[in-house]
Amino acid sequence: MKKFRFKITSLAVVAALACNPALAQELTSAQKYERLQLASHEESLMYLLLSDKKYQEVISHKDAALRYYKESTWFPSTTFYYYLGTAYEGLGMDAHAARAYKWALRGDSFYGMGGGGSTFQFYPQYIRLLLRQNRLQDAQDVYTVFLDTQSTRMNSMRKSPHGYDSDPFPILVLFHDDPKADVWAFTPNRLEAAVTMLEAMEGDWDAQLEAANRAHALFPEWYVPVAYQAFYVDYFNDLKCDEALYAQAVALARTDEERTWLSTLHLYHSKPRYLAREDPNFPELVDSYKRRAQIAYLGRRSLELAALTPSSIAIRNGGPYREIDDDPLGG
């Protein structure tokens, strides 16, 4: 009980300091860390309220969380802005939501719950919001940054010795010329389909199959959704392949490289998985992350966007502390 009382007292002292700027200037490292803990607590409350779709109550925690972050000298976390953006979107405040998502892309702070500051979860949400606002160039720019993150992140947790657990068909769709990209003329539906398949990479097989069905309806000329439907795998049973869908995917493939990826996976599906994994001569599946890294446009455009003011993404990895409310809506 004494320990519990001490904790409450400690938090109360820290909260009191928040009302006194003169004292805040003299915060010790330990007190700043407590401020960071308080900010994280506000985020936890936002998360719980968001789970219950209490969007207005989520937003009511914004000012306190920002104050604690500022006095801790840490930038607000990615997840803080993600929760805030989702709440604004739930209330139909799309301009506010877009601004919050943009700030989440700032990426200065990796402190917070929900993936340690990972931005993967909300890229699709932000892009769909921009499409709904008819901000088509902004949507393409954010997609470019999203695709760039999928060329640099580590894939070691999901990749088996023969690549079975990696995404076997690299998503290379781009709406700008690059010799290493799968270049298409832009349409909102094509962008939505590409984002849908990227989003599905974080899900289970059922989620991937559902995403493939939706993506194919949006982008019927693209071979990737059809290929995923052809090679749908029940993880606990033998590998399967729908030969008719496989033939359709091969017909839709536009390059020899894509056809090679298809034939390699088809060969993998033609024998029990343990034989394929144990065969040292079996061809490895493509590493999708390394293949995307060959698209020079992605990194170049991401750096250009980071330097632009205003931009559909905020300054990443640097810049002075600013309050989100100082940023023009829709900027």
Image (spheres, helix red, strand yellow):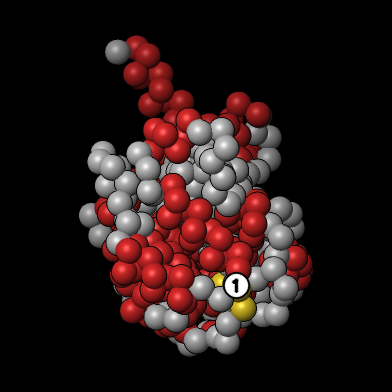
Q: Label 1, secondary structure: give it.
A: loop
Does 268 appear above or below 186?
A: above
**Does residue 302 appear to the left or right of 203 in the view shown?**
right
Task: Please tell me which residue is depicted at 46% across the width and 26% down the height of the picture.
Answer: 10
Quarter that holds the C terminus: bottom right
- Left or right: where 225 falls relative to 161: left
Residue 9, horizontal then vertical, whole percent: 41, 25
Determine which residue is flagged by label 1.
255
Eyeballing the image, is 185 above or below 182?
A: below
Where does the image place residue 141, in percent across and percent down from the top left? 61, 74
Q: Is residue 142 visible?
A: no
Q: Quadrant of residue 288?
A: bottom right
Q: Tell me, yes or no, if residue 187 can be seen here.
A: yes
Residue type beneath disc 1 = Thr
Query: Which one is in front, 279 or 223?
Result: 279
| Residue at (39% x, 33% y) in the render | 274
Q: Nearer the viewer, residue 226 or 47?
A: 226
Query: At 41% from the left edge and 22% from the top edge, which residue is drawn?
Result: 7
Q: Mark 1, residues whose alpha carbon is within 10 Å: few (<14), some, or many (≥20)?
A: few
The one of 224 and 125 positioned closer to us in this rendering: 224
